[in-house]
Image (cartoon, rainbow, N blue to C red):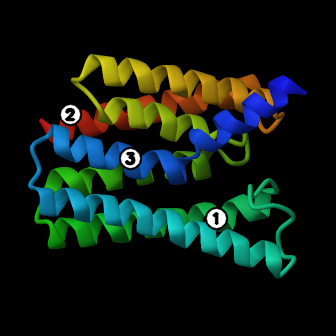
């Protein structure tokens, strides 16, 4: 029982809707973005999280979904399509509003994670929690203590997703890898 509670807390702390706005804001500051652009990046990440959260809540309340987690394949498909569109729209808006290609690339790279989940959907339920947690760690490069701390959080989130039986070990490992690859792509673009 105690491990289930710990797993739920870790899954919540490592939820993409909470973790990504913080990681995007820190990444913007680390790359020397002006305060205005940093706030725009944070606002874009929060807007995507709110849109997805409100959409999920609406689906559950209308009894079209069983749970906010979008556990059924059709639920995940609709959620992931919405998420890709929202991330790409936010990236475009950020590129225009902040005039920062680095910040826009950060959101666009996160859309790659969801596109990977869509591409793999017939083979597995990729852990987006794990993918976004490892992506958040990569965003904090080159500040090694921050990268290490968030990487440990990503591993803990992976454990939580297994403990809660939301994913298989393969889905967790692939999720961590996809997030790390998206982070590598972002860091190559940001240099």
Residue at image coords 17%, 72%: 97
Secondary element type, mark 2: helix
Q: Seen from this angle, which residue lies furthest front?
A: 2
Question: Residue at label 1?
Answer: 79
Point out the tag, 2 or 1, that comes first from the N-terminus.
Answer: 1
Residue 82 visible in image: no
Secondary element type, mark 1: helix
For the residues bearing labels 1 and 3, Cβ distance under 8 angstroms: no
Is 156 drawn above or below residue 129 in the view shown?
Answer: above
Question: Residue at label 2?
Answer: 188
> How far apart in space, not on screen, are marks 1 and 3 (Cα)?
22 Å
Question: Residue at label 3?
Answer: 22
Q: Residues within 10 Å of mark 3 (few under 14, many from 20)?
A: some
> How far apart in space, not on screen, are marks 3 and 2 (Cα)?
21 Å
Residue at image coords 9%, 43%: 32
Q: Position of residue 158 (x, y in %)?
A: 65, 27
Front residue of this view, candidates 183 and 13? 13
Is 186 drawn above or below residue 177 in the view shown?
Answer: below
Q: Which is closer to the viewer, label 3 or label 2? A: 3
Q: Position of residue 16 (x, y in %)?
A: 53, 48
């Amino acid at each position: 029982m105690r491990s289930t509670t710990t797993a739920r807390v870790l899954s919540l702390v490592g939820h993409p809707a909470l973790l990504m706005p913080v990681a995007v804001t820190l990444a913007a500051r680390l790359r020397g973005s002006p305060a205005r652009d940093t706030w725009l990046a944070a606002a874009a990440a929060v807007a995507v999280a709110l849109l997805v959260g409100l959409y999920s809540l609406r689906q559950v309340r209308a009894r079209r979904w069983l749970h906010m987690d979008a556990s059924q394949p059709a639920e995940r498909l609709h959620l992931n399509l919405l998420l890709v569109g929202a991330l790409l729209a936010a990236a475009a808006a950020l590129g225009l509003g902040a005039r920062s290609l680095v910040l826009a690339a950060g959101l666009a790279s996160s859309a790659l994670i969801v596109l990977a989940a869509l591409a793999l959907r017939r083979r597995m339920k990729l852990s987006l929690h794990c993918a976004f947690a490892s992506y958040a760690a990569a965003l904090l490069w080159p500040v090694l203590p921050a990268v290490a701390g968030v990487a440990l959080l990503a591993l803990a989130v992976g454990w939580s997703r297994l403990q809660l039986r939301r994913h298989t070990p393969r889905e967790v490992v692939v999720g961590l890898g996809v997030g790390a690859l998206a982070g590598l792509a972002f860091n190559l673009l940001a240099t």
